Image (spheres, rainbow, N blue to C red):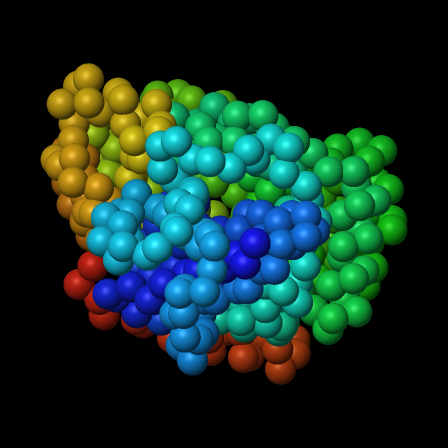
Amino acid sequence: MNIAFLFPPLKRKYATCGQNRQFQYFNEPFFAYPLMPARIATYLQNQGHKVDWIDCISNPNAKMDYTNYDKVYIEVKYPIAQEIYNMNIPNAVYYGDIENDPIDYNTLPWDIDRLLTQWWLYAYDNGNYRKLPGTYIQSAQDCRWGKCSFCSWGAKYRNYRVRDYKDVLGEVRYLKSLGVKEIMDDAGTFPYRGDTLAKFCEELPNITYNCNMRFGELGYTDYCRMKKAGFRMLLFGVESCNDETLKKINKGVICKEIIEGCMLASKAGLDVHLTVMYGYPWESQRDAENTLHTIYYLLTQGYASSVQATLVIPYPNTPLYKQALDYGWLLTQDLTKYDMSQPVLVTSYDPMEFAKRTYRIAFNPFFLWRKIRRIRTYDDIKFYYRTLKKVRGHLNSGKCLCSKLA
């Protein structure tokens, strides 16, 4: 068959689906390499089908031509599902964050044809990369914990799968041959521990490597080993700095472990990137202040390097959404509004204002001084310049659009 993987142009310019656990609009270009669509496209091509990759969002020059295809695969997220359905694209196969997803992710191979999927389109406009070009990789699907009540991917990919570390290293070597300088491993949690972690670090080629991590999974010796091997940044999901909230969302950690984990990773020389959310229905403004002040402490003391602040948005496939229905916490069930631009849960304070206050630390003199002291190369200067543009765009926006403060 003739098959197209289509990312159609949407009403708002920077509306990206691929590799975003929750859909959101961006003020400036942000493109994450869409690993799951790339794996599906590669599998179909390996089955003998002719596959074309048409991304009208990351490539404005692409033509949305779908007339000559037997099937047109389109990734869907809840907030933009109706907009995509209204396009009435013939022979469309919808997959992603929707009910009755036709893809069997539990048996999907790991192979990716980077040329077919035009990896270079996603290699530059992404705040996770200090060195360019960069790309994403996936050592596991998705997170070994997989119990957080807000996580749509934990609910979607119920069978946790881990790749053989040698297979991952083989892909890393291939990416390096393409000219890739930095990698973001977007497994929900980097999976390797003990001897396997030691072997991975020992055999990792000379390339900058980043990954997602959970607090309490590794120790100081592990972090030192990773730093020596070429790891630069670890992304930790904080979510809240209130133990009662961490318990309610089934995070599996307490605030003390969050602080200790940041201290150990930063002591090893790694960049610690934190993600935090505001807008839990049961939290008071005082609770939100506690989270904000803890994040400020970690950043100004040098225990964390960057932060991303968003709103709590429960997708319909998550336990938190079901809980919100039961307790009457939902402000709306109109999923087009679940795009990070406004709260959808009842709160006693303004979570958007707290997200903005989190980003204002970019202008804290202690934070700035620590950043200046860490400048070593021209790549560092260019990285901070790109990041500052994104932070300014975020603060100047009237909506809570995701950004990254680095």
The percent coordinates of residue 262 (x first, y second) are: 56, 43
Residue at the image position 40 percent from the left and 65 percent from the top: 67
Residue 323 lies in quadrant: top left
Q: Is residue 278 above or below residue 124?
A: above
Residue 280 lies left or right of residue 124; in this view the side is left
Residue 173 lies in quadrant: bottom right
The answer to whether residue 351 of the structure is visible from this angle is no
Residue at the image position 30 percent from the left and 69 percent from the top: 13
Q: Is residue 162 above or below residue 303?
A: above
Residue at the image position 47 percent from the left and 24 percent from the top: 147
Q: Along the line of sight, which residue is nearer the eye, 294 or 240?
A: 240
How many numbered marks does the figure carry? 0
Q: Along the line of sight, which residue is nearer the eye, 237 or 329?
A: 329
The percent coordinates of residue 243 (x first, y second) are: 38, 25
Residue 293 lies left or right of residue 368; in this view the side is left
The percent coordinates of residue 186 (x first, y second) are: 58, 48
The answer to whether residue 133 of the structure is visible from this angle is yes
Residue at the image position 41 percent from the left and 75 percent from the top: 63
**Quarter that holds the N terminus:** bottom right
The percent coordinates of residue 265 (x first, y second) are: 63, 45
Residue 307 lies left or right of residue 47; in this view the side is left
